[in-house]
Amino acid sequence: MKKVKKSTWLCFVALIIALFTVITGALCFGNGVQAGAVNDYDNYIAGYNIVYDIRADRTMTVTEDLTFHFYQKSGFVRDIPVNGGEKVQNIKVKEIKDGKEQSVYHKVTAENDDKGNYYICVDMGSQQTKNGLYTYRLTYDYIVPETEYEKKNNIIALAPIGRGYAFEIENIDLEIRLPEGYVNDDRTKCFIDGFGQTQVALTSSTENGKTVLRAHVDYLSARTGLRFDAGFEEGVLTEKFDFTPYIFVIIAVALIFVIIIVKALVYSKSHLTPVVNFEAPDSMDPLLMGKLIDTRINNEDISSMIIYFADKGYLEIDLTDENNPTLIRKVKLLPNKCADYETEMFEGLFERGETVKISELKYRFYKTVERVTSKINAKTRGLYTGKSMCVAAAFAFIGGILLGLAPFILAFFTISKTYFVLAPFLAIVPILVVFGASQTVKWYSLKFDKKKKALFSALIALLCVAVSLVYALLSPAWIMGFLPKFLLCAAACAASAVSVTVISRSDKYTEQLNQIVGFKNFILLAEKDRLEKLIEDDPQFYYHILPYAQVLGVSDKWEEKFKDITVQPPNWATRSAMNTAFSFYMFNSIMRRSMTSMSKNMYSRPSSSGASGGGRSHFGGFSGGGHGGGGGHFR
């Protein structure tokens, strides 16, 4: 007998093993995936029947009949991906018993995983622990945008079963109902998506004018999905335009018009009619005027009182050290006609002696400033009518509420009545910030020139754009698209900004402002010959007006008007240089540095008492391939 070589034996053994593998695979593969060993102690899906009824506008109704095998679990959470702009609507869940649908507990939420993927999560099944087989029917409308891959190939790509199931799935039946325009070519395919791709056979039929494709898979192992692509004629597939979110944009725009109408019909009686005057209104010191012009007590308002007291003869200012001037008291008491806050401030300046260096006020004079501010605020209450303030705030609040209501209502009525979206209501905060910023600009409008008004108006517009972008990016994309979200927020911001126009002045405040604005107009518009006559009649006229020009924000304009006019030195200033030749420009340069030092020191606070230096800042008076897939988990 001829001896067989060793290598021949090895080849024979390898062939036997290969044949065994093929035969075993043929017996154990349902459509290319080996069946696992599930038992009564496992949680898995024992049956998965999926129907896609697809329309040409890329919308579809999806029905999923899921038969779960529970072992000491109470329910199941189905996760439907919404990462690519997909929308899930009209979610319904029923339990199938004896072939009949019955109501069952379910709840819809939105969640994201650690990779930033978002899902609409449908929690189904009562809280009672279950063992055995239970069947639930999940139906929903699915609206899918067109990806670049789909656009290039004129297809719809779906993932009927995603790779997000960490357990076995048995007995999968897939049914796809396709609209007119479907093309049966190599673009249409169904395959198992796991550690490779295994083609699944499709059968085709025509029912009610629609092509129906079906596929069956006996078994899918954990983390294995099912993919489906269908090809169409060019131009058949479109995208659905959903007008519903734009209804809220229209409502927000309508709110703007309502505000304008309310302003015109109810709150239009506080227009100013300035009365030009070359003197400050009677009984109005710079501090009061500074408060009335912008409703705030600022650092320049406080420091202006030093020049005012000096001009009245109550003190002198030694400017020898222009960075640290010395105040010298000239009167024991202020006249009785002076307001209580004037006396409070004057006594606070000299509470430690008859002379005081500005640097000595550091870290202590702020207490006097607080008392003075409190008194003048009490004296000037009711500048704006309370009713108009409330109406304006209400309009701004409504704008903010709209940003919360829009996604809440859309989610409730289009996705599920168990889905409550509350986070967008937080948008009321930035809307009120816009309101506060707009209100601040309104307060300062009489103090700002045209350039500053335009600048701050532009800044508010940029703030509105920024708020709208953040809202559009952070609000759920599966509820509203980017454009309607951006337009809605932009309109709400605009309504908030416009609402401040409703705020109306009291009659008394309007009368006071008529005089103040008229006085400011004199400072801005007075001609040289008129000023020369006034200086001739009163050589100290320039200094009488200077503290008022400071609080009105036009001191630079006032100084410029006297560049070609001879001005004598002030009676209240002492400095060795002034005993020789007086320079108007040098004096104003010295005063600017001195006033800066005064403002800094008079407002400064120790660190334990708050921020130091400069003025106070105010911000308004109110305070993987294919759509679908995903997965799920037992609970």
Image (cartoon, rainbow, N blue to C red):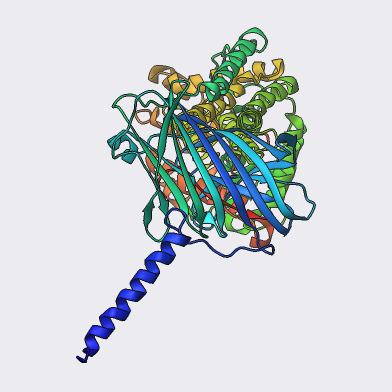
User: Does the rendering let one see residue 571?
Assistant: no
Q: Looking at the image, which residue is at 56% across and 40% down?
A: 300
Using the image, determine if residue 99 lies above or below residue 248: below
Residue nearer the viewer, 315 or 195: 195
Residue 102 lies left or right of residue 487; in this view the side is right
Residue nearer the viewer, 2 or 10: 2
User: As drawn, which residue projects farthest toward the top?
Assistant: 265
Where in the figure is residue 53, as x and y percent of width and height? 50, 30
Using the image, determine if residue 552 lies above or below residue 429: above
Q: How many marks?
A: 0
Residue nearer the viewer, 408 or 611: 408
Q: Looking at the image, which residue is at 61% across and 29% down?
A: 414
Give the quadrant of the C terminus: bottom right
Where in the figure is residue 567, as x and y percent of width and height? 42, 32
Where in the figure is residue 221, as x and y percent of width and height? 51, 59
User: As drawn, which residue projects farthest toward the front?
Assistant: 1
Q: Looking at the image, which residue is at 37% across and 55% down?
A: 197
Where in the figure is residue 374, as x and y percent of width and height? 74, 40
User: Does the rendering let one see residue 251?
Assistant: yes
